[in-house]
Image (tube, rainbow, N blue to C red):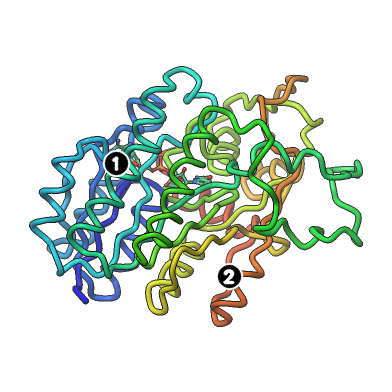
Amino acid sequence: MGSVVVITGSAGLIGSESVRHFAGLGMDVVGVDNDMRGYFFGADGSTKWNLERLTKEIGDRYTHHSLDIRDREGLDQLFAKLGKNIGLVIHAAAQPSHDWAAREPFTDFDVNAVGTINMLEATRRHAIEAPFIFTSTNKVYGDTPNSLPLVEQETRWELPEDHKWYGGIDETMSIDSSMHSVFGASKVAADVMVQEYGRYFDMPTSVFRGGTLTGPGHSAAELHGFLAYVMRCVMEGRLYKIYGYKGKMVRDAIHSHDLVSAFEAFFRAPRVAEIYNMGGGRFSNCSHIEAFAIAEEITGREARTEYVDENRMGDHQWWISGTGRFEEHFPDWKLTYDVPAILREMYEANQDVWKA
Ligand SMILES: NC(=O)c1ccc[n+]([C@@H]2O[C@H](COP(=O)([O-])OP(=O)(O)OC[C@H]3O[C@@H](n4cnc5c(N)ncnc54)[C@H](O)[C@@H]3O)[C@@H](O)[C@H]2O)c1
């Protein structure tokens, strides 16, 4: 198998971490990213800064293509050129926000769903043996997690300890009969298609259904990037609006480094048509109230928050990923960052950027 990794969304949070990681393993990385995040979220969201940092850091091992994953022919030509040199495909380019998707449903679907089949088909035609890793989302379960019997605690909502998913929701939760949002539905389409290319064409495809993915490579914007935006607001003295659930909604958070080390585990021992719920699990999770308390402690600054009674449509009240299936398949993989470690690293990495 080839020594080239093709990574889409290579200037984004997960893509850039993947670029660094696999270049560090001595592989040549071909990145595809057209900075569409800047179009989605404005200047705050642009990933240009991250691309500049990457190209400086990685040098010759990294080749960038400002290609749109909706450009089917462009992708096909790129894959045809690289052919069997491709040893791994990581598809992390996406329109990642619920709220944004409702503004332009066609664009959301074209990027998330059609862009994914474009990637799958280019891989099938030119590098069928290469493991294909797709970053899906826990939003494929729609709002079904909100039917869990949650109990209100002082700083968070919580499941009773004897509930089967206390340790985290696993992949047996149904993806049917729930409200997904336009974004969730376009990701479901992509997620199922990635599984299908595995089963139908016997390709080593995998779907990683992320909870909150985070890390210092996040271009924090209000509509996407929970922990990074919390830290940014506290550091800059910006007002943060908390939408619903009394500020007690629970998210698990996985650092991009820990996610990408899971990608490496899959790359080294690929399987066909796998799905994995992937997040910080019980090891790394928090509510809004808890995240702000930690951020205040780290920065020594007081957070400015405003509470809006209505939650975002379809937003999960409680999500902790059950990562048992992945751990069973890859027992050597371990989480290394919890929420305080993630926030501290963001604080340290952005001292010169996020100023009051
Ligand atoms: N960040 C999270 O909390 C989270 C949670 C669950 C799932 N995910 C999924 O993980 C993946 C990566 O997320 P991320 O946080 O790194 O996102 P990101 O927005 O930081 O990175 C995505 C990158 O893709 C690029 N891109 C977007 N549309 C493109 C197009 N049409 N052609 C080429 N490039 C394009 C963007 O410019 C951006 O640099 C996405 O599929 C997302 O849905 C993210």
Residue 283 location in percent, x, y?
70, 64
Farthest bottom residue? 332
On screen, residue 55 versus residue 197, left or right, reads left
- Local packing at callout 2 (Cα closer than 10 Å; few below 14, some 14-19, many 20+) is some
| Residue at image mark 2 | 326
Calculate the distance from the C-alpha at mark 2 to the C-alpha at mark 1: 33 Å
- Label 1 near label 2: C-beta < 8 Å? no
Residue 93 location in percent, x, y?
35, 44
Label at residue 49: 1
Residue at the spot 66% in from the left edge and 25% down from the top edge: 313
The total number of labels drawn is 2
* Residue in front for this viewpoint, 214 or 175: 175
Residue 187 location in percent, x, y?
48, 40
Residue type beneath disc 2: Phe
Q: Secondary structure at mark 2?
A: helix
- The quarter of the rendering in which ligand 1 is drawn is top left
Residue 247 location in percent, x, y?
77, 34
* Residue in front for this viewpoint, 12 or 205: 205
| Quarter of the view holding residue 218 | top left
| Residue 156 can be seen, yes or no | no
| Quarter of the view holding residue 35 | top left
